[in-house]
């Protein structure tokens, strides 16, 4: 019997990674960041300041549920449990209800810190394109936030806006970026930045027989345009790095670079040893990394005590 | 003289045929993807309803967001100008017109002669429009008519945080999961849009009589929410979604084939600034 398969175009791939080169039992300090977003949740475990494990998954029905989901996924088969954490910080929209966290820090601070660690100390502007909001952050060479602007009121320029589009056009969300460049010429952007109105426009274009890849290009352009407004308000200082889910969509990233007249930093680890070890670079874990790093710093400076139970 | 007004909106086309101020036909239908064709077909329907031929009509004026697609129109006037003329015809005491359609919410200050004195529109965002209502009705799994009825049964107001139709849909779904009574959710949706429309209306100044037209005027739940927001009585003529087409017909009768109107676009502040 053939089982009917319901394809969910918006469902981006979840990821889990564990560092095979580290034996955590030989380490001194284990710190964790748990980033609970409105659309995705992430857990990052660092061992003596090195990346040990991370997971990135769809947010569950509530914060505690999501937190356990990502922590358990990251720790699976490692033999580690939450009792081994020296300190854990919760961040993101759902941070107040992270059961295993000792305290919370805003995602703005965590993303800037995380981006600094991932991309290097040259980063001065970080754009986090999240599931339901978009944040533009100016920071110093140590990843400290100087100022920021946020749009959390409008779906355009957010992951949800892209998910809605993927569903409508029936193309898996991770294919949209690459396919948006398989076109003959760059089409005019969708005129509505509003996702709801853009949907109607897209339906019209589909019915007119406009090639799907061109429609994807037009939509990515509209999204890039919406994000540009936020960046221009803040002022983009070099170097400029992107974090969050939409950073994975080259259709939006390249068009944003074009409109901005600036390149974004290449999405690779700044540390050569991490590049050599071929550790997968996931833009979605910046917040979790920042939270894990803050945990480490607070322990090392004696600001907090270890919460380790085992 | 027999004239026709055709209002080609984002969701629906409305056609009105009049003879010396008497309405001979009123026909409405979905705009669909091919707007020119929809306008053509509905115009033919209206002529049939009135028992007329195309040659019997002296002048056709079009309006609406896609009024320019009406190839056989003698003239095209802006929405606001058509609304003003149509409302004054229906309710001579009107001085403020609030028109909420599928794609735009607008407020117009009008003179006793039906001229536009001031005009403000909500920016291109589904949150201040009928599309928001449609989206939430789908999330609640009811028709818009049922949603209107439900909203009138509510006895308390709950705040809706989302200002975006996309986020609002998720919010409605979680309110349902939290077992919030449906009447209260329906009312919260109407209150949310009423708040946005209210702020657009306050830009032009609220002078009585305040008259509401456009498709959303058929939603009694929304009208109640709007009254609460502006703290004033709101009059709704019968067939409020035909007011624009009627106004275009009035313009046709007066020989007005074009008009310029300046709009103030009200942009919601969406970007939040912050320091560390």
Image: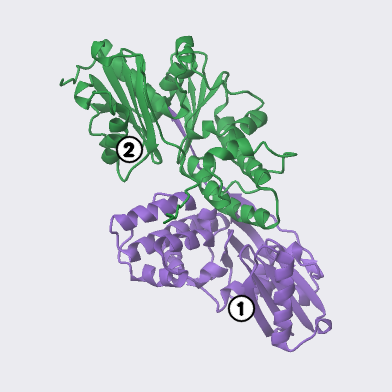
Position in image of residue B67 (x %, y %)? 72, 64
Looking at this view, is B139 or B240 the one in front?
B139
Q: Residue at x 36, y 33 (%)?
A: A92
| Residue of label 2 | A94
Position in image of residue B240 (x %, y %)? 57, 74
Q: Colour of chain B?
A: purple
- Residue B250 in sight in this render: no
Q: Quick one: quadrant of the C terminus of chain A?
A: top left
Q: How is the image coloured?
A: by chain
| Residue of label 1 | B90
Q: Could you say whether the residue bearing mark 2 is in a helix, strand or loop? A: loop
Left or right of residue B273, residue A249 in this image: right
Left or right of residue A258, residue A160 in this image: left
Image chain in green: A
Q: Classify 10 Å Cα crowding around label 1: few (below 14), some (14-19), many (20 and above).
A: some
Left or right of residue B234, residue A264 in this image: right
Mark drawn on residue A267: none
Position in image of residue B228 (x %, y %)? 41, 64
**What is the quadrant of residue B119 in the picture?**
bottom right
- Residue A101 in sight in this render: yes
Name the mark nearer the viewer: 1 or 2. 2
Looking at this view, is A96 or B267 the one in front?
A96
Could you confirm whether marks 1 and 2 are on the same chain?
no
């Amino acid at each position: 019997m053939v089982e009917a398969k319901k394809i969910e175009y918006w469902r981006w791939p979840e990821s889990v990674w564990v560092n095979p080169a580290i034996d955590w039992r030989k380490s001194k300090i284990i710190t964790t960041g748990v980033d609970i977003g409105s659309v995705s949740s992430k857990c990052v475990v660092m061992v003596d300041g090195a990346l040990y494990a991370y997971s990135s998954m769809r947010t569950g029905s509530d914060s505690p549920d999501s937190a356990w989901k990502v922590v358990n996924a990251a720790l699976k088969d490692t033999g580690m449990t939450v009792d081994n954490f020296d300190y854990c910080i919760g961040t993101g929209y759902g941070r107040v209800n992270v059961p295993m966290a000792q305290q919370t820090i805003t995602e703005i601070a965590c993303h800037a810190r995380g981006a600094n660690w991932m991309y290097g100390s040259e980063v001065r502007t970080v754009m986090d394109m999240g599931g339901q909001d978009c944040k533009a952050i100016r920071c110093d060479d140590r990843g400290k936030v100087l100022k920021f602007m946020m749009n959390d009121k409008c779906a355009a320029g957010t992951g949800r806006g892209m998910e809605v589009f993927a569903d409508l056009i029936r193309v898996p969300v991770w294919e949209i970026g690459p396919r948006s460049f398989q076109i003959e010429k760059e089409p005019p952007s969708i005129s509505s930045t509003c996702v709801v109105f853009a949907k109607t426009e897209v339906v019209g274009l589909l019915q007119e027989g406009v090639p799907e890849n061109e429609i994807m290009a037009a939509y990515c352009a509209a999204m890039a345009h919406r994000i540009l407004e936020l960046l221009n308000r803040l002022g983009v200082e070099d170097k400029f790095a992107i974090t969050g889910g939409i950073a994975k969509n080259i259709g939006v990233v390249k068009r944003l670079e074009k409109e901005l007249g600036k390149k974004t930093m290449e999405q690779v680890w700044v540390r050569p040893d991490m590049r050599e070890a071929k550790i997968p670079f996931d833009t979605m874990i910046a917040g979790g990394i920042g939270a894990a790093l803050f945990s480490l710093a607070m322990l090392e400076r004696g600001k907090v005590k270890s919460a380790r139970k085992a | 003289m027999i004239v026709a007004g055709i209002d080609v909106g984002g969701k629906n086309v409305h056609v009105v045929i009049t003879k010396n101020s008497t309405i001979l036909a009123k026909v409405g239908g979905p705009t669909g993807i091919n707007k020119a064709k929809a306008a053509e077909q509905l115009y033919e329907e209206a002529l049939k309803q009135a028992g007329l031929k195309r040659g019997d009509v002296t002048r056709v004026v079009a309006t609406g967001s896609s009024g320019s697609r009406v190839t056989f129109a003698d003239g095209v006037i802006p929405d606001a100008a058509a609304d003003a003329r149509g409302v004054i015809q229906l309710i001579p005491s009107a001085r403020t017109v609030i028109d909420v359609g599928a794609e735009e919410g607008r407020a117009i200050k009008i003179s006793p002669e039906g001229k536009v004195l001031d005009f403000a529109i909500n920016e291109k965002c589904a949150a201040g429009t009928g599309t928001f209502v449609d989206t939430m009705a789908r999330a609640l799994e009811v028709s818009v008519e049922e949603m209107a009825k439900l909203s009138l049964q509510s006895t308390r107001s709950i705040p809706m945080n989302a200002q975006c139709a996309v986020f609002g849909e998720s919010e409605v779904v979680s309110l349902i999961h939290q077992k919030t009574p449906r009447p209260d959710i329906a009312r919260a949706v109407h209150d949310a849009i009423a708040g946005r429309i209210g702020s657009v209306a306050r830009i032009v100044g609220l002078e009585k009589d305040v008259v509401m037209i456009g498709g959303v005027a058929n939603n009694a739940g929304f009208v109640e929410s709007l009254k609460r927001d502006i703290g004033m009585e709101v009059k709704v003529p019968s067939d409020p979604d035909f007011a624009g087409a009627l106004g275009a017909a009035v313009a046709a009768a007066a020989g007005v084939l074009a008009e310029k109107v300046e709009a103030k676009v009200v942009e919601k502040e969406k970007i939040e600034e912050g320091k560390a």
